[in-house]
Image: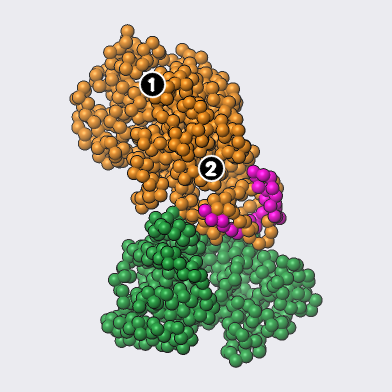
Chain colours: A orange, B green
Amino acid sequence: MTHPAAPDAALGLEGIPHTGEGLTADGHLTEPQSEDFDHARQAPEDPHWYKTAVFYEVLVRAFNDSDGNGTGDLRGLADKLDYLQWLGVDCLWLPPFYASPLRDGGYDISDFRAILPEFGTVEDFVYLLDQAHKRGIRVITDLVLNHTSDAHPWFQESRNNPEGPYGDFYVWSDNDEQYADARIIFVDTETSNWTFDPVRGQFYWHRFFAHQPDLNYENPEVQEAMLDVLRFWLDLGIDGFRLDAVPYLFEEEGTNCENLPRTHEFLRRCRKVVDDEYPGRVLLAEANQWPADVVEYFGDPATGGDECHMAFHFPLMPRIFMAVRRESRFPISEILAQTPAIPRNAQWGIFLRNHDELTLEMVTDEERDYMYAEYAKDPRMKANIGIRRRLAPLLDNDRNQQELFTALLLSLPGSPVLYYGDEIGMGDNIWLGDRDAVRTPMQWSPDRNAGFSRTDPGRLYLPVIMDPIYGFQAVNVEAQMNNTSSLLHWTRRMLQVRTQHTAFGLGDFAELGSSNPSVLAYLRRHGDDVILCVNNLSRFPQPVELDLAPYRGRVPMELTGGVRFPAIGELPYLLTLPGHGFYWFQISTRTEEVEPV
Amino acid sequence: MTTRPRHVVAALADDLAEWLPRQRWYAAKGSRPARIDVRAAAQLGAGDPALIQALVDVTAEGSGTEPYQLLIGLRSELPEHLAHAGIGRVGGDYAYEATQDPELMALLLDLMAAGRETEGISWQPEPGIRLVTGLRARPIGVEQSNTSIIFGYHYILKLFRRPTPGPNRDVELHRALFRAGSEQVAEPVAEVRWDGLVLGFAQRYLADSVEGWAAATASVRDLLAEGDLFAAEVGGDFAGEAGRLGEALATVHLDLARVLGAERMPADAVGAAVDELHARLDRALARVPELGEHEPMVRAAFDALRGLDGVDVQQVHGDLHLGQTLRTTTGWVLIDFEGEPAASPADRLRTRSPLRDVAGMLRSFDYAALHLLAGTEPDRQQLTRALEWADRNREAFCDGYAAVAGDPREQSALLRALELDKAVYEVVYEAGHRPDWLDIPLAALRRAG
């Protein structure tokens, strides 16, 4: 019998294993267990795979619809794994696919152990995972540790039964005065971090939307319950988690309630579970903060890192955009100079675009105004404190700039994360609500619904892009597969080059000064593998003289064509670059002592 | 191989008399050295190649006697990459300008690191500095009065080719600022001296820096390629950087005043200073008659200062323009505190109004805005855009300065007079060196009228 607190019918989970199908004798909700399902085969063993991997963020909803209901699903994604293997990506990052009322793009999870019915079932997920591993592709997904949907049976139990086992699962208070120093994140929609719940007659704490109550990590049972959620998916074979909104797990009066020591303590517990029980899987922290603060989430350097394996480098991305617009390398040079060293087993995740807006939290107010003026010419392009555009329209569909940006993404320190569709230069639709502008269906072919779905066009979860420049008849995978000079083929070739050189993933980073402010040049060095990257951030052709004296006598070889350039001599090495041009060179295979910059 | 450095230099006298006038740092332009006396000479490296450092007095025909610093390399064979640096022959060896030879220049770092003294010439690291050795040496481009060598990515050594007696302003101000904790100068690391003369000065090299001039002109280039956009609208907007430059300069001024003092120039001394401005203008008018139409306006601006009841003065940079600023990954740094190149050594040491530096920067923004249009048919559209760029960045620079120290625009009469004085100086310079650019300062004078 269904427990009355769980609104299963509304969430479409009737007849599917889910949390709260029954109650145990002591009042706990029953939850699906991993033993109830098949497990996927394992990916090839490689404890440090994440340091050299190219990640690909793909929205299940947006990629491929296998059952013709207008919404992409897990089986549909599995059907496109051959394409992703051909492209050369190493790991898929799936934003949340859990049961959810979908009031925050699935980040409002109402059941950690059930799949959103329109995406499929846990069995479908295991199939996808198994097929991906078969092709050497790994899969990670988002897990929101900080909060649940208010539709989660835990919250329903908590509000209805304050004395029951879930009464203390959330942060309840008789007033809304505590933790006044914590900032409000979604300033567009929320006016307080507290909301009154008429059912329980108390206020509950939420750092994000009011429909996403924060879990109470003070309660050891909450910690255990969330560790068991990790174990559930790791047992099925998942390769890791992107931990969403990690800085906010604990609250403490008199602080801004971010990055508190006990939050780190809990992350160390998560890491220990992974290291002890599931070696080779990764934790990726989503902490939208300055690099000097984010490094805390890698944990203790003495251990090589004992919290998250990876963390996103947020400020780099807007600064790449700013540097190219300003034709000056300093926005990038500055942020990299301020980026501290990370533990030896840690790696940054870097990206140009993702499913959220172009985040401008990590720039100053002055810079933010500037970015708005440059990249969000229409007010509708703005969202929260970011810009809701895809890469191609942000760059006015300029192929040279798309290539330059991608070359930067693939060569700067960190594992690159591509966003689905950017490999073909897909456009956006800023007239769609919220952040849906950049979440439209993948464009596979010029056929109906861009080959994404067989359904009626009106039934699609979002309309496909149809404008004359970015519309699916002009921009699609099929056409670009048949054209070897397409952006798709170019991207694939660059990924191939990147895989051949460990320096991109494992090497150190040393910026080479140059007297030309528009040219960003740096070395990536890993043992014998020395790569020189030179990028012209200006739209005009530029010369640059580089001090490569430590490599005198060696012959730089350009990596995409294998052409040998003149040997490095006594004088500074002169290169000329076309507007928005870039070069990747391999300097030499010989070892010689190199001075640090 | 010779072991007698004085003899080598003396033996090269005729060759040097031919060679010296071709060097950019040779002061008595157009007149041949009549006499070369060796004051000091030291052998810094023996073997093949060998290195000789010498201080010589050069007496030129129709000109006075000036000391010069020479670095002479000796090799039994002159490789092709050094052929352009040849001076002459001594015995069986080729003598050449040694600063072009990385192999010999690398020795200088060892001398500094070891604190070596040879023939009275001392190579001394700054107190508490331990230099990294074994770095490659690399000479950099041509400079007016110095030759600079870069060691690895670590240090830059500036060799003063025309060393002057008395305190070296560049060294003294750098030391004072660095000791005051300034982040706007590169750290001093070593000094080369002989008998009270500073022959060289080494600093931490800011390998990852860009000259302010290059950064500003990149912005102007971006603007001019648009044509129909305002300076605030184009991607390469420089105003943020200009503001940070203003903050950096104000910080340097405050630091200099704090450690070296500031004073109030009394009203009567202001009168004498105004007379000096007029005298400079007189000399400029004699050389560039085109200045005549602006004379009344400039003189009126100078005379407007006579009413001031005093002017705050202190040590300042003295020759500030965008080319004396470096953008590093942490902010702006000022370089070359030698003072105004045209002034006498004693004059350079005087205290001045900090607005002199501000005026220098404001003029430099004008140059950056207009130099791409110099020598071309004037295009009204582009000229208007360029002037808007200059105004925007001049304002941003003053805003930045005002955020740290007093707003220079509040002393408008003084700022105007100093800017005009600078423009007059530029007119004379351009008339002599770059006639294509002459219209940049002349147009500024026209706009000021």
Q: Is A443 in front, or is A154? A: A443
Q: Which residue is mark 2?
A: A406
Q: Say the numbered circle drawn on residue A99.
A: 1
Name the kind of residue labelled 1 in the image. Answer: Ala
- In the image, taking residue B221 as reference, residue B93 lies left or right, namely right
Residue B163 is one of the magenta-drawn residues: no
- In the image, taking residue A229 as reference, residue B109 lies left or right, namely right
Residue located 36% across and 36% down the image: A431
Which image quarter is the N terminus of chain A in? top left
Residue A552 is one of the magenta-drawn residues: yes
**Residue B421 appears anywhere in the view:** yes
Residue B2, image quadrant: bottom right
Q: Is A587 in front, or is B204? A: A587
Q: Chain of mark 2?
A: A
Q: Chain of mark 1?
A: A
- Residue B304, given in percent of the width and then of the height, sits at 30, 82
Dominant SS type (magenta): loop
Tell me where the magenta segment starts and ends, as one range.
A539-567
In the rendered image, the vertical position of residue B239 relative to residue A216, given as above or below: below
